[in-house]
Image: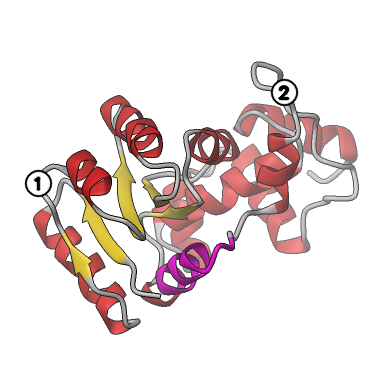
């Protein structure tokens, strides 16, 4: 089935790059000026929307209301469980980090167009919690790996995330992402909470 695809991002170069990535996967893409009117005016549509501000969140909801059939893929600057849940509840079919690889973007978008969604277990668990309540802590079985325990020990010693990233060979952005995922698995709200839990477990 032919699907019309719109790409919306505030940065023209990034938008063109995303369009090229999707074209490489066999999709036909457009960059309409009025995305809401475009969605209302076409059938069998999909839209990839970068969500950076509150107005972008409102756009996501508006697009979903404009056409219940539109397949929405949300590109988030920082993918957290809370923002992923918010995007899915706003009508997104899936959530993708804005700094994802071309192949991961193609995979996620292809799945969404086929009526499937790539969603992490943590996000699925959070979706089962009624809106307005805090998600349950991650299971105790989600213990950190030996490498992750080293990261926690370094953070406890006062090592910056930038220095830690350099030491282990990741970009600082990727390190922040990995640490956020680790905190979520530990049922921690932030670094301090994660270190308190790690200390209590004897991981430091």
Q: Quadrant of residue 183?
A: top right
User: Does 49 sit left or right of 107 as displayed?
Assistant: left
Q: Quadrant of residue 200?
A: top right
Nearer to the camera, 55 or 194: 55
Q: CA distance from mark 2 to mark 1?
A: 36 Å
Tell me where residue 31 appears, x and y as whole percent.
15, 57
User: Does 145 sit left or right of 62 as displayed?
Assistant: right
Nearer to the camera, 72 or 50: 72
Nearer to the camera, 182 or 47: 47
- Between marks 2 and 1 in the image, the one whose residue lies nearer the viewer: 1
Image quadrant occupied by the N terminus: bottom left
Tell me where residue 150 appears, x and y as whole percent.
69, 55
Circle 2 SS class: loop
Q: In the image as oriented, which residue stretches furthest toward the top? A: 132
The mark nearer the N terminus, 2 or 1, is 1
Magenta stretch holds residue 112 = yes
Image quadrant occupied by the C terminus: top right
Circle 1 SS class: loop
Residue carrying label 2: 130
Q: Residues within 10 Å of mark 2 (few under 14, many from 20)?
A: few
Nearer to the camera, 100 or 51: 51
Q: Quadrant of residue 190?
A: top right
Which segment did they paint magenta?
Answer: 104-116
Residue carrying label 1: 33
Q: Main secondary structure of the magenta part?
A: helix
Magenta stretch holds residue 30 = no
Q: Residue at x 65, y 21 (%)?
A: 131
Q: Which mark is residue 74?
A: none
Tell me where residue 71 appears, x and y as whole percent.
42, 54
Q: Residues within 10 Å of mark 1 (few under 14, many from 20)?
A: few
């Amino acid at each position: 089935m032919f699907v019309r695809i719109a790409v919306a991002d505030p940065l023209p170069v990034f938008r063109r790059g995303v369009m090229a990535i999707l074209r490489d996967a066999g999709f036909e893409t457009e960059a309409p000026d009025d995305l809401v009117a475009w969605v209302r005016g076409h059938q069998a549509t999909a839209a990839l929307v970068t969500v950076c501000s509150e107005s972008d969140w409102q756009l996501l909801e508006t697009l979903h209301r404009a056409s219940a059939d539109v397949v929405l893929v949300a590109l988030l600057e920082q993918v957290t469980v809370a923002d992923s849940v918010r995007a899915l509840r706003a009508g997104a079919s899936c959530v993708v980090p804005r700094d994802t690889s071309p192949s991961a973007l193609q995979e996620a978008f292809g799945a969404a167009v086929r009526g499937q969604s790539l969603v992490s277990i943590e996000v699925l668990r959070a979706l089962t919690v009624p809106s307005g309540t805090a998600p349950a802590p991650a299971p105790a079985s989600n213990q950190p790996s030996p490498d992750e325990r080293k990261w926690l020990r370094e953070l406890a010693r006062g090592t910056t995330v930038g220095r830690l990233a350099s030491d282990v060979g990741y970009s600082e952005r990727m390190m922040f992402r990995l640490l956020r995922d680790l905190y979520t698995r530990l049922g921690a709200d932030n670094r301090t909470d994660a270190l308190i839990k790690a200390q209590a477990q004897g991981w430091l």
